[in-house]
Amino acid sequence: MPDLPPFDRQGLPPVMGTPSRRAPSAAARAAAAGQATSAPLASAGSPAGDPLHPSLPARPIARPQSEPSARSPLPRSAYVHIPFCHRRCFYCDFPVVPLGDRADGAGGSGSASIAAYLELLHHEIALSPPGPPLSTVYLGGGTPSMLSPDQVAAVLQTLDRRYGLAPGAEISLEMDPASFDQARLSGYLAGGINRVSLGGQSFDDGVLASLGRRHRAEDLLQAAAWLRRAQARGDLASWSLDLIQSLPGQSLSHWHQQLQAAIAQAPPHLSIYELSIEPGTVFERRLGRGELELVDQDLAADLMELTQRDLSQAGYGHYEISNYALPGHASRHNRVYWSGAGWWGFGMGATAAPHGRRLARPRTRGDYAAWLAAQAAGAASQLGAEEAGAEGDALAAPGMATDERWIVGLRRREGVNARQLAAAAGLGPTDLAALRRQLAPFEQRHLLLVEGDRWRLSDPAGLALSNAVLRELLAWWPAEPDPGH
């Protein structure tokens, strides 16, 4: 294993700061926590939420924010949520419906539930406002590979009828090892899938069991081999592998072994997620009982630095905090979220933001069915509110605020244009200088790099300590003026 001296953090602000009178937008807090404004990441592509990143303490919502433009371009990306899975993993707080280990959309246990949900999903897509052909589509979950190839192809056909699929569109499907075989994979590819996101999480059977995962290392290795062969034949354009780091009891040597095992599978793309403990999960209950010992912040940062070293040596570019890719294999769909562009979202628990305004669908099947019935009847139509860019009801949330654009942008390798973002928020050069003074300890330690108007986090040290930088930015962000004064 490469020599990895501990990083010296002396003189930096604490990673967990205390709330100040200034407060960021709620979405910015989520983005700083890695949730990408409800827009990635089951596998770095799912706007149903990201269970693998920590949440910040609740703080008041503030503005300023950039308002959506009525002239904003219509989205060319769509996220489709397939909520079904075999079992709920111990870290998962996604809107999912566990159906048991034998469930399958192709006539097995739970097939009636899957068919009933798909009928609703097709109906929602048909009711949605029209738009230009889609350049990216992401089917996330849940475990979408519980659907049969014909069911997946039918969803794509419904999207094609409503919007069209642009030539060369990136069409991704999340798949879990042990949820498909080679024939099923061939069926998905024949139906239009050209990119796969494989939810491996670990090559260690003990770790997989401790996470509540259904598959084992042997299943993961077999699935990766099938994907490699499909790519070599030209049937599959690209594929990604998910792993989780900072697991209880994880050491640098163990994580190095996991990374080397992943590299040996030759995935063109890797998503590496930090474990976080989410409310209502098995892990939260175990932590409360003192049964879960989490890695400390220093080790977590060292693990991330090791990730960057191992993967960069293997040829992977670090294009976003959690995402690495070989040249030409960065996820186009992921970049939609990180850039702040709009997207369509369909299905239970999915979030859409076609005009800079977010609308989250209900998180249970019953509520989703009732909500969709209201859309069809034209009563309090949220689909129309999306088209107009309106607020809608309590499920609707404002679009990407300027402070949120800072947070999401700094997660990317290229960072942000600080002058443009400050101007969008109504902040002048004096304000920008004040923010730079606030972040001076990070700049002095070369964690934050200021290159003219371009501000970005260094790689790996700055990205490894991104939460500290982002929390400090949030602590500074100006609160909305009191309308009574």
Image (cartoon, helix red, strand yellow):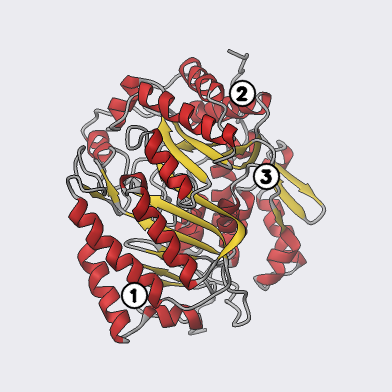
Spatial distance from mark 3 to mark 1, Cα to Cα?
35 Å
Type of amino acid at the residue the image marks with label 1 = Ala
Instruction: Please report the residue visible at 41 percent of the width from the left and 55 percent of the height from the top.
Output: 153
Residue denoted by label 1 = 394
Q: Is residue 421 in view from this perspective?
A: yes
Side of 358 relative to 284 (left or right): right
Type of amino acid at the residue the image marks with label 3 = Arg
First in residue order: circle 3 vs circle 2: 2
Check disc 3 and report its element: helix, strand or loop.
loop
Residue denoted by label 3 = 413
Q: Is residue 60 in view from this perspective?
A: no
Q: Position of residue 178 (x, y in %)?
A: 33, 32
Q: Quadrant of the rendered structure where residue 466 is?
A: top right
Q: Position of residue 352 (x, y in %)?
A: 45, 67
**Above or below — where is 248 with respect to 399?**
above
| Observer-nearest of 42 and 11 | 42
Q: Position of residue 136 (x, y in %)?
A: 55, 57
| Observer-nearest of 263 and 228 | 228
Side of 255 relative to 118 (left or right): right
Instruction: Please report the residue visible at 57 percent of the width from the left and 68 percent of the height from the top.
Output: 133
**Above or below — where is 461 with respect to 369?**
above
